[in-house]
């Protein structure tokens, strides 16, 4: 059996909560042809969503939302989770979160600075939680230690790790790297839901009165603690609010690629871009997901089972496959009774400008191009 291979580090797998049963089941589905790249494509009717709420800071509704958000912040009811996992490969095998953005401040340091500003303004802490991976954990925790927690008290800077898995060959056999060892990877940010529960971090946050959790990528510094956005989420009553922004063409003339809100088979949800039919017009779905979410903290106690998708990669110049889950798909997850796990709210926010909330930095060239823009955005 594949998992009996003596080259596998079972202590590493156990430490990072490897799901053996689900992995074995997925291998069986790959070999039977039930799980392929094509099986992730949506075949049901897809329609645009027409009830996205525009977040407008200078409107009467915006003023109401700001007051609600500020009350939540003053009561210490908000925490921020930052996705700092993955494989640390896009920045030249350096963990992105520890990379300097400007003035000696890293991505993690700037996320910490943001929650500190909120704490100072509203008189109550906003706990910062890092979701690391086996590939980013050690470097990130050492960076936090060297930075003396960036001024945050111990109870206000928490961390947990996402799970781990094993890459496979195209034939669903164990992929062995050029170093003669199995190839491990972090299987997507859908791990957030099980990880925050299994680690005890969710219980700790709930125990101190946290009711709203902000969720964003470590490389998106536009996703700041904003009382108006928080207020719009709270006023909606949704378990999960997704920040989306108007889709547009990139500098090369291509449309934004990524997740989008849609109605699929009658269900309103977020759909990751690779699942959309290839013949769907790129501007058919007008909004684009920023991967910023707001969650009702108590709703995260519910079990969320997300689908695994087969993703093709190139590792050591050879084809490999890995299985990943995606956080946005929680918007379509059902419970054992066939009911939605989360009610979904959709908030349209600006991507750039002084209130911009989407500044993704995927590679060093992006950072070089955006450094001064980010400095100005965060100074405001």
Image: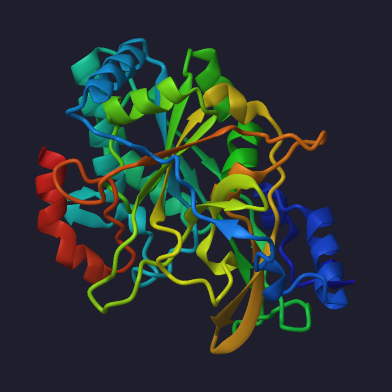
Residue at 80% x, 64% y is 26
Quick check: 236 above or below 364?
above
Foreground of the two, 187 or 253: 253
Look at the image and tell me whether residue 154 can be seen: no
Residue 203 in the image: state x and y as whole percent.
Answer: 59, 22
Q: How is the image coloured?
A: rainbow
Residue 233 in the image: state x and y as whole percent.
Answer: 41, 28
Quick check: 43 above or below 279?
above
Foreground of the two, 6 or 125: 125
Residue 104 in the image: state x and y as whole percent.
Answer: 15, 50
Residue at 19% x, 18% y is 121
Quadrant the N terminus occupies: bottom right
Residue 130 in the image: state x and y as whole percent.
Answer: 44, 41
Foreground of the two, 71 or 256: 256
The image quarter in which residue 53 lies: top left
Horizontal side, residue 24 vs residue 355: left or right: right
Foreground of the two, 232 or 310: 232
Look at the image and tell me whether residue 158 can be seen: yes
Quick check: 45 above or below 198?
below
Quadrant the C terminus occupies: top left
Residue at 84% x, 72% y is 2
């Amino acid at each position: 059996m594949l998992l009996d291979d003596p080259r596998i580090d079972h202590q590493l797998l156990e430490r990072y909560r490897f799901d053996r049963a689900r992995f074995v089941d997925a291998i069986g589905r790959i070999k039977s042809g039930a799980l392929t790249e094509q099986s992730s494509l949506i075949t049901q009717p897809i329609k645009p969503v027409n009830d996205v709420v525009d977040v407008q800071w200078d409107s009467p509704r915006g003023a109401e939302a700001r007051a609600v958000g500020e009350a939540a912040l003053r009561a210490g009811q908000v925490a921020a989770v930052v996705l700092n996992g993955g494989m640390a490969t896009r920045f030249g095998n350096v963990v992105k979160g520890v990379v300097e953005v400007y003035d000696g401040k890293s991505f993690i340091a700037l996320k910490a600075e943001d929650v500190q500003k909120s704490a100072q303004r509203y008189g109550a802490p906003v706990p910062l939680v890092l979701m690391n991976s086996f590939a980013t954990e050690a470097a990130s925790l050492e960076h936090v230690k060297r930075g003396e927690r960036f001024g945050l008290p111990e109870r206000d800077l928490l961390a947990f790790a996402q799970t781990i898995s094993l890459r496979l060959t195209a034939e669903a056999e164990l992929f062995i790297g050029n170093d003669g060892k199995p190839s491990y990877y972090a299987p997507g940010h859908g791990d957030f839901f099980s990880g925050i529960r299994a680690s005890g971090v969710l219980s700790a946050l709930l125990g101190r009165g946290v009711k709203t959790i902000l969720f964003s990528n470590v490389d998106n510094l536009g996703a700041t603690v904003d009382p108006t956005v928080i207020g719009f989420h709270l006023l909606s009553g949704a378990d999960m609010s997704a920040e989306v922004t108007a889709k547009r063409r990139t500098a090369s003339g291509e449309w934004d690629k990524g997740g989008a809100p849609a109605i699929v088979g009658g269900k309103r949800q977020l759909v990751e871009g690779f699942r959309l039919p290839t013949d769907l017009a790129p501007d058919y779905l007008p909004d684009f997901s920023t991967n910023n979410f707001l969650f009702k903290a108590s709703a995260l106690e519910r079990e969320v089972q997300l689908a695994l998708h087969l993703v093709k990669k190139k590792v050591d110049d050879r084809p490999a496959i890995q299985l990943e889950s995606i956080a946005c798909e929680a918007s379509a997850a059902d419970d054992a009774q066939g009911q939605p796990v989360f009610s979904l709210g959709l908030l349209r926010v600006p991507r750039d400008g002084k209130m911009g909330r989407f500044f993704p930095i995927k590679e060093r060239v992006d950072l070089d191009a955006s450094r001064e823009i980010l400095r100005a955005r965060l100074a405001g």
